[in-house]
Image (cartoon, rainbow, N blue to C red):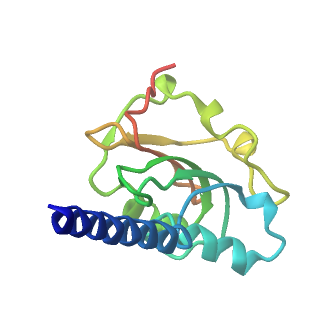
Amino acid sequence: MNKNIQKIALLLCAVLVLFAGCATGSRNKTMTTDTYSSSFTDHDEKMDFLKKYVVLFSPVEDAEYHIQYQDNSTGLIPGPSDWDMRIILKIAPTDIPLWLDGFGEIPLETVDLDWWAGLSSETLSYEDLQGGMAYARTGDHRVAVVAYPDTGVVLKIIDSLPIQYVV
């Protein structure tokens, strides 16, 4: 009986060491962040950071964003991650259709543009945009896009929860 207790104790120790090693090793690779693009002074670094979180469907001239990402894939009991990303992109006007592929149009008057409040720079600001706009979202209501075809500006929101897009 004493040998059985020793075997069980050794097995438990091995399991604890395994879990501790997995948990500490994966923490170094977390994607958790709460980052504004304004925190970058270098344009290339700002764009490289964005590419870690968002698929870019065309070349991007400039971008402003706020990325909140909680990486829940690490630790003893991993789970689904949570995110809320607000992005303004300046692209070639001819690339707008690449960003709207698979989306359905919704009346612009139902869109709350305050989602992107605070995301502006000297070269890019949603407040200055006027003219023809199209609004689209995915069927699961987790990605929304407002596109300005004349100026090549895309406002995008990506959320892990359904977006309440109606004003």
Which residue of the protein is positioned furthest toward the top in this rendering? Answer: 167
Which residue of the protein is positioned furthest toward the bottom in this rendering? Answer: 44
Nearest the camera: 106 or 71?
71
Residue shown at 47%/23% (left/top)? 110
Left or right: where 88 falls relative to 83: right
Q: Quadrant of residue 165?
A: top left
Nearest the camera: 147 or 62?
62
Left or right: where 2 falls relative to 135: left
Residue 167 spot, x, y in % from top left: 52, 19
Where is the N terminus found, in terms of image quarters? bottom left
Nearest the camera: 106 or 143?
143
Residue 48 spot, x, y in % from top left: 62, 77
Residue 25 spot, x, y in % from top left: 49, 75
Which residue of the protein is positioned furthest toward the front in this rendering? Answer: 2
Q: Is 43 above or below relative to 16?
A: below
Residue shown at 28%/39% (left/top)? 140
Nearest the camera: 130 or 51?
51
Left or right: where 158 falls relative to 105: right
Q: How many marks?
A: 0
